[in-house]
Amino acid sequence: MSTQPLIGQSVSRLEGHLKVTGKAKYAGDYTTSGLLYGYIVNSTITKGKITAIHTEEAKALTGVIEVFSHENKPSLAWLDLKYADMDAPPGTVFKPLHDGDILCNGQPIALVVAETFELARYAASLVRVEYEEEHFETNLKNNLDKARAPKIGLATLLKPLPPKPVGDFEKAFNQSYAQVEAEYSHGTEHHNPLELFATTTIYEKDGKLTIYDKTQGTVNCQVYVANVFGLSFKDVRVISPYVGGAFGSGLRPQYQLFFSVLAALQLKRSVKVMLDRHQMFTFGHRPPTIQHTRFGADKDGKVNALNHSAFAETSQFEDYTEVVVNWSHMLYPAENTLMEYKLVPLDVYSPLDMRAPGGSTGIHAIESSMDELAYKLNIDPLELRLINYADRDVSVDRPYSSKELKECYLQGAEKFGWANRNPQPRSMKRGNKLVGYGMATGIWEANRLPARAEVAFTKQGKLQVKSAVTDIGTGTFTVISQIAADELGLLLGDVNFSYGDSKMPFAPIQGGSFTIASVGTAVREACKALRKKLLKKAQKMEGSAFADASIDDVVFREGAMYRKDDPSIFVKLTTVIDANKGRPVKTTNFAVPNVFKLKKYSRATHSAAFVEVEVDEELGVVNVTRALTVVAAGRIINPKTARSQVLGGMVWSISKALREETISDYNLGKYMNPNLAEYHIPVHADIHELDVMFVEEKEEILNDLGIKGVGEIGLVAMPPAIANAIYHATGKRINQFPIHLEALL
Ligand code: MOS
């Protein structure tokens, strides 16, 4: 690998070998002498009260230490009854063991602590619970009469509610030359990262806690634990060493963290609590939705009326919201719009962000409606997008900070061979299978949050970089290291990045595709300041050849500082440190985005997806034989990790459109397939040719690095492109996700 610049190079994940050889230790892998194991008991009813909980039989087993329930909940828990977490929606946070009320099926109601995991799990099976059951409702479709506007809270800042209506939608729609009207429904989905949620709380000699936790936010969990248990922040350290996928499920502290800490504090012992696969279906999910669209266009294809309404499930205790209906007007500049978003509180756990929350739901309805409109107008679906192309975000009347969506369309169409498509449905065949081409647009917000970073250059010639940020498998470790190395002109091997630890400088929760824009910027700023400081130190050295140099007169490369005007003059950075009595030179930076500047622009990543499907109508089987996603996301720091992010989103798109769904039994109020045998996801045989392209895009507003973030964007355009391809293949418009085989027979 050549040295500079590292930005733009496809560096393989620095921790990759540790992961594939099993050397990487995850939260549940940590151990210590005398470690105890907890296993959680979950409610088997959906709503009501616990009238009695019988734990004697479990406690009688040798090796069982304690059983915690609401009846003997230590008084140390829930000292701050109001505290939730950084990703909490408006409402009242769920408090495990707070009382005997049951709010949803699977609610954690007790913790058995024993000397081994197996014993704890067995003992948990002996805990008998008596309940008083109450009537419950878990069926979204049957409860639309309870729909209401969401409450507004802090979370609304990052998840804006629908914009106000514009013009006169009804009139414009009724007068439209072409109209489409459709209902879309999406089932519940549960996050199923390979790594199960786990917390190992080490009870230190002085009563302080070192907590290995699976989370997307170390500081978030530190603050949660300190507040809920009334501890001092400095006595709580949360380490999230490696994260085996999370997809949003780790944005909020999960209940195993609460239980592990509760038991550790009460027993003054170290305690590990790990969930098993079925328990992964008990703490939040992508909510089911029912959406309606009515789009109207004139003869030339100009969309002039957009109505998008959504009903989404939430719990009875929090108003989980996501951005489902705001996107169509960001993409298509209609003069008349009506956007509505309502919540239906049901007796379920609070829904939870899952990759591209809201976007992957709403954009399906928008992009399949656009496809239908294209057929009504007899205009090519890609052409229809170009006719309605917006250079400005008319929904809020602001320019985009950058937008190369048109290039995504054009380069994608070229590469995919969109021109070979016969527009007529059912016109393309391969053997006994129908072939269809579909395309769709994607959009996702490009955000940036405040973050801190510390960097130090040591006498060993290493750059130490520190941030509390996690790496949830996205490549954060590698990409941040690349940014830091470039700034100081170092080899990647000379950068040591310490992360995933609440002791390190503040980082926000890792999500929303904003991590590199936030933490990457903080690290870069800290490195810039370090360069200045190193120059100052060099200038203080005796006979310094840099005495009159400003920072613009020097260049950092190969571990040294050079004069630009005379590259034969240089000083090694380690020499500068030696002159500093061997003490590292250190800087910290708190990078806060300029919200006044940012507010003048809409900031979004864009994509276009092109899909080929083969449909076997005798069996109802759909194969996604070929897919291409073209992304405009500003500058790409690491094409390999960025591509992997988009590929993951593309595999998930196949899952979302064709496989994935948690099935509810509304009579029991219970999820019926909480395991990976019955919760269908694609397997290798489902994945064929997937291709990713990034177009050039110059972003100058969001941050100096010119990056926008790549994560969620892979999962927004392709699901509707699959549905549209199925329509093209079969002439059947299926608006229910996932598309079941029987719908195509
Ligand atoms: Mo993602 S849903 O922002 O972790």
Image: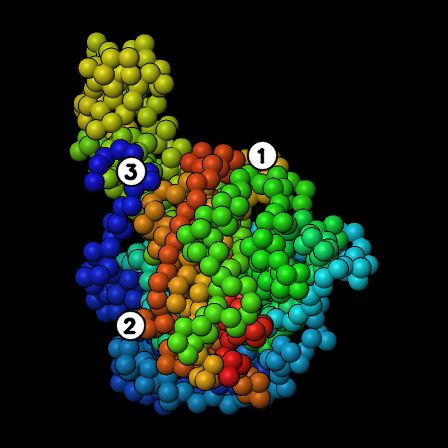
Residue 314 rendering spot, x and y as whole percentages: 60, 69
Res. 265 image quadrant: bottom left
x, y (%) of residue 137?
62, 81
Of the image marks 1 and 2, the number of the one nearer the N terminus: 2
Q: Does 114 sit above or below residue 412?
A: below
User: Which amino acid type is marked by label 3?
Assistant: Leu
> Residue 590 falls in which quadrant of the image?
top left
Q: Amino acid at mark 1?
A: Lys
Q: Which residue is mark 3?
A: 6
Q: Quadrant of residue 374?
A: bottom right
Left or right: 32 in relation to 423: left
Q: Nearer the viewer, residue 462 or 631?
A: 631
For the point 32% across and 71% down, the residue is 684
Q: Provide the secondary structure element on which disc 3 rests.
A: loop
> Which is more foreground, mark 2 or mark 3?
3
Query: Can the viewer see residue 400?
Result: yes
In the image, residue 561 lies at what x, y percent? 25, 22
